[in-house]
Image (cartoon, grey):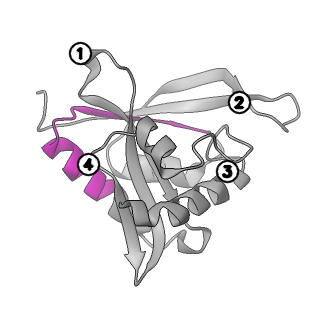
Amino acid sequence: MKKSDWNAVLNIYIEGMETKNATFETKKPEWESWEDWDKDHLTTCRLVVKEGAKVLGWAALLPISSRQFYSGVAEVSIYLDKDSLGKGIGSMLMESLIVQSEKEGFWMLQSEIFPENIGSIRLHDKFSFRKVGVREKIGKMEGMDNGWRDVVLMERRSKKVGV
């Protein structure tokens, strides 16, 4: 992923946001610029899949903590262009993300997924993420009936790093 991909990355994120099943965000994110997004995400393991100049999907990692002993654990963020769903783009991104994250020394990847996002749960299952549990009513989502949403916590332990 390069700075020149920023507008496509943001637009794909907004598409995901509009589904109400990809993120708690309901309004254009605070990171309206590449610089804001760059501060929140790890500088490594940033990926895009393109067809020609068009970005079909992207993946990145977020730190789960600033504490040094968690430096090998990161949160997965994968978003696909709505026209790219079901075409294997998510699998390409996840496989590449896992390989690159292990090269960078990550021993665990985790994701928090809305239970209704069956496609994302299946993608994580396919790549040996295990369901840790359901975090009930972990956050409130603006514009929902009562607002409270659960997330499925999934994690993948590397068989190469930190064993």
Label 3 – label 4 distance at C-alpha: 24 Å
**Three-letter code, disc 2:** Arg
Choose the circle earlier in sequence order: 1 or 2. 1
Choose the circle earlier in sequence order: 4 or 2. 4
Choose the circle earlier in sequence order: 1 or 4. 1
Quadrant where the C terminus sits is top left
Rendering coords of residue 40 (x, y %): 45, 36
Dot label at residue 98? 4
Contact between marks 4 and 2 (CB within 8 A): the answer is no
Residue 68 visible within the image: yes
**Three-letter code, disc 3:** Met
Label 1 – label 4 distance at C-alpha: 20 Å
* Residue nearer the viewer, 96 or 158: 96
Q: What's the residue at 13%, 34% (across, down)?
A: 161
Dot label at residue 17? 3
Choose the circle earlier in sequence order: 3 or 1. 3
Q: Which residue is mark 1?
A: 69
**Is residue 83 placed above or below 30 in the rendered structure?**
below
**Three-letter code, disc 1:** Phe
Q: What's the residue at 13%, 27% (across, down)?
A: 162
Rendering coords of residue 160 (x, y %): 11, 38
Q: Secondary structure at mark 2?
A: strand
Label 2 – label 3 distance at C-alpha: 14 Å
Q: Secondary structure at mark 1?
A: helix
Dot label at residue 149? 2
